[in-house]
Amino acid sequence: MNSPVIFQKIENHHYLFQVSLHNPKILLEKIISVDLIKVIYDLNPDLYEKVTLEKIDDENSTILTVIKPLFKDLGLPQRYTFIDVVRSTEEDNIIFKIKSKQDNPPEVTSFMEQVPIKIGIITCQKIDVHTFNVTFDIYLESSLLIPTFMEKIIETIWKKILKRFQSFLSQL
């Protein structure tokens, strides 16, 4: 059975997501990579218009995600993320550090705005070979205006995304 996805607002522009990943048939540490991050996006075509992964080497990648214009009717711009991802290992933890790139990819139009990520840290803590506790600690740039009602929508969307991923992984 899948564990719940936990969301916490730590303070303005600082959020924390936690989820446990488990599959008794797979050695999870062998598949936890930036490719798995792309799978998360690929499992959510209703939310993402485009996802591009450019692997620079085994530890460094760039990911572009163009989010569908979910709030167009509210007059809000379409959003995208353009991030550098660095993978590292510390003891039994696999860590991904994420930061927004400052340049714009060619796919971005003047009607889009970047979700400015100051820093994001995804820590995959090994419990055993089949189980990892994952924490996503994200700090958004203070320049991003997030109305209170949007925080609940963001929480709901991310819980949905992580639940889909958790379900996918448990069925492998």
Image (cartoon, grey):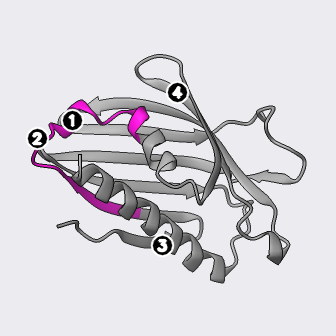
Q: Is residue 83 magenta?
A: no
Give the secondary structure at mark 3: strand
- Quarter holding the C terminus? top left
Q: Secondary structure at mark 2?
A: loop
Say whether disc 4 or disc 1 marks the residue closer to the N-terminus: 1
| Label 1 – label 2 distance at C-alpha | 7 Å
Q: Which residue is mark 3?
A: 9
Instruction: Name the amino acid, label 4.
Output: Ser
Q: What residue would you read off at disc 4? A: 61
Residue 129's disc number = 2
Q: Are marks 2 and 3 in contact (CB under 8 Å)?
A: no
Where does label 1 land, which residue? 29
Q: Which residues are magenta?
A: 17-36
Report the front residue among 103 and 66: 66
Q: Compared to 127, does 4 lie above or below?
A: below
Alpha carbons under labels 4 and 1: distance apart: 18 Å
34, 1: nearer the viewer: 1
